């Protein structure tokens, strides 16, 4: 998804980000990765989380020509403001590996203004870039909503729903573990907490990102915020995490500090798998499931329930590739929308049988050890 932003309005915002990074104490504790290690020292970090965070460590340099350079780790935050020599490259700002970047082409080879926030999150370019078509729909893992005709026909998540009785060794399934189309990364909590995330302040959010209120991008952003603000269904605790640190805090507050995170590891293309091993994960304290949302930066909708169990499932595809998937089984679906995608696919009624689904690669499950 491509969000178009005016450089003049965003530049000051990005400078604030750089100043915040530049004023941190040197060390790893303040980064998302450092926070994970401090809070979850015995819990391995899933690959999807590694893909969504930025490196740590800070370096600030001032060249002999008073050219300023600021760097935060490998591919982290770096700023280069040359002294304006003929043929110079102009201002260059980058935050995170594929994170936030600003470039003003000032030399004879300059390419004009370019701004990016997140891999595929917020981008400004000259000439303009063409983004993928935006599809606005309710997520299949938000259980209050009825499925649309488009979801029933085209949503790859249709194949991820199944009945718990079918979760056994030797079972064959056609599955697609594709990630969401968004490639936006996590913002550090110190930055994310300064950005409004509320329907009441939605006009302010659009103005901050210079997004047309009538655009598809605005519709997607609004839908994500509205889903986050919807009340949880009976028996669940719900929270939208706008940073990794917030996700860790929510999960540990519900499950205790001795937790582990799991995610699916598989190739995204649809293929036939057969199950080779099924292992139930600990769930004495319930589980927390966090679903990736479409937004300008990484946002996860998390919900905790005590009537849901999780499984680690190993599978072998017909082409010889392997997958380690996370499956979630909801034992009580009485409060779900009767026309939810799962019921229409499985031909069952709410509250009658446990409903299960595999999670795409970019969703995360938290369990107590």
Image (cartoon, rainbow, N blue to C red):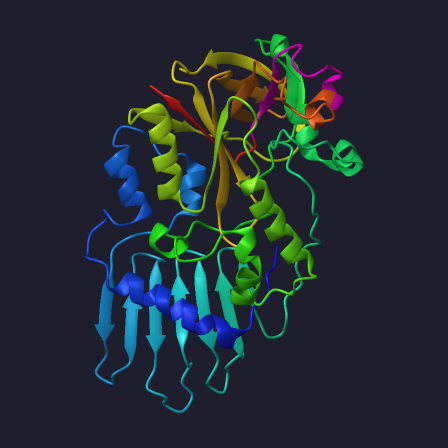
Residue placed farthest to the left in the image? 26
Residue 117: where, in percent of width, then height? 48, 60
* Residue depicted at x 54% and y 13%: 276
Q: Quadrant of the N terminus?
A: bottom right
> Taking 3 as reference, is 31 left or right?
left
* Residue depicted at x 72% and y 23%: 338
> Taking 272 as reference, is 17 left or right?
left
Is residue 297 a member of the stretch shown in magenta? no
Segment tinted magenta in the rendering: 344-359
Q: Would you say residue 272 is visible in this rendering?
A: no
Q: Quadrant of residue 154?
A: top right
Residue 231: where, in percent of width, then height? 55, 34
Q: Would you say residue 339 is visible in this rendering?
A: yes
In this rendering, is residue 101 above or below 167? below
Residue placed farthest to the front in the image? 200
Q: Quadrant of the C terminus?
A: top left
* Residue depicted at x 23% and y 48%: 28
In this rendering, is residue 109 above or below 347? below
Residue 56: where, in percent of width, then height? 29, 52
């Amino acid at each position: 998804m491509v969000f178009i932003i005016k450089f003049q309005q965003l530049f000051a915002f990005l400078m604030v980000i750089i100043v915040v990074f530049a004023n941190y104490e040197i060390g790893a504790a303040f980064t998302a990765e450092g926070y994970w290690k401090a809070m979850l020292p015995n819990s391995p970090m899933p690959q999807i989380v590694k893909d969504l965070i930025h490196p740590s460590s800070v370096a600030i340099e001032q060249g002999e020509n008073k050219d300023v350079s600021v760097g935060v780790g490998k591919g982290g935050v770096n700023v280069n403001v040359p002294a304006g020599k003929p043929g110079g490259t102009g201002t260059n700002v980058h935050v995170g590996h594929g994170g936030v970047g600003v470039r003003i082409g000032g030399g004879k080879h300059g390419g004009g203004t370019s701004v990016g926030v997140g891999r595929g999150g917020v981008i400004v370019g000259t000439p303009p870039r063409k983004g993928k078509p935006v599809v606005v729909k309710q997520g299949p893992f938000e259980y209050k909503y009825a499925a649309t005709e488009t979801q029933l026909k085209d949503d790859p998540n249709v194949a991820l729903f199944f009945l718990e009785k079918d979760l056994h060794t030797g079972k064959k399934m056609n599955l697609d573990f594709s990630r969401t189309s968004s490639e936006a990364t996590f913002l550090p909590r110190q930055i994310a907490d300064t950005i409004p995330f509320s329907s009441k302040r939605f006009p302010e959010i659009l103005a901050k990102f210079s997004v047309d209120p009538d655009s598809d991008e605005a519709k997607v952003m609004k839908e994500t915020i509205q889903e986050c603000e919807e009340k949880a269904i009976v028996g669940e605790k719900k929270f939208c995490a706008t940073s990794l640190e917030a996700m860790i805090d929510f999960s540990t507050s519900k499950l205790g500090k001795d937790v582990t995170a799991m995610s699916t590891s598989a190739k995204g293309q649809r293929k036939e798998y057969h199950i080779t091993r099924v292992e139930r994960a600990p769930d004495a304290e319930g589980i927390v499931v966090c679903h990736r949302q479409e937004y300008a930066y990484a946002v996860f909708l998390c919900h905790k329930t005590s009537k849901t169990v999780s499984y680690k499932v190993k599978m072998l595809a017909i082409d010889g590739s392997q997958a380690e998937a996370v499956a979630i089984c909801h034992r009580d679906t009485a409060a779900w929308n009767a026309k939810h995608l799962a019921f229409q696919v499985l031909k069952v009624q709410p509250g009658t049988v446990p409903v299960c689904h595999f999670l795409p690669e970019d969703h995360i499950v938290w369990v107590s050890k």
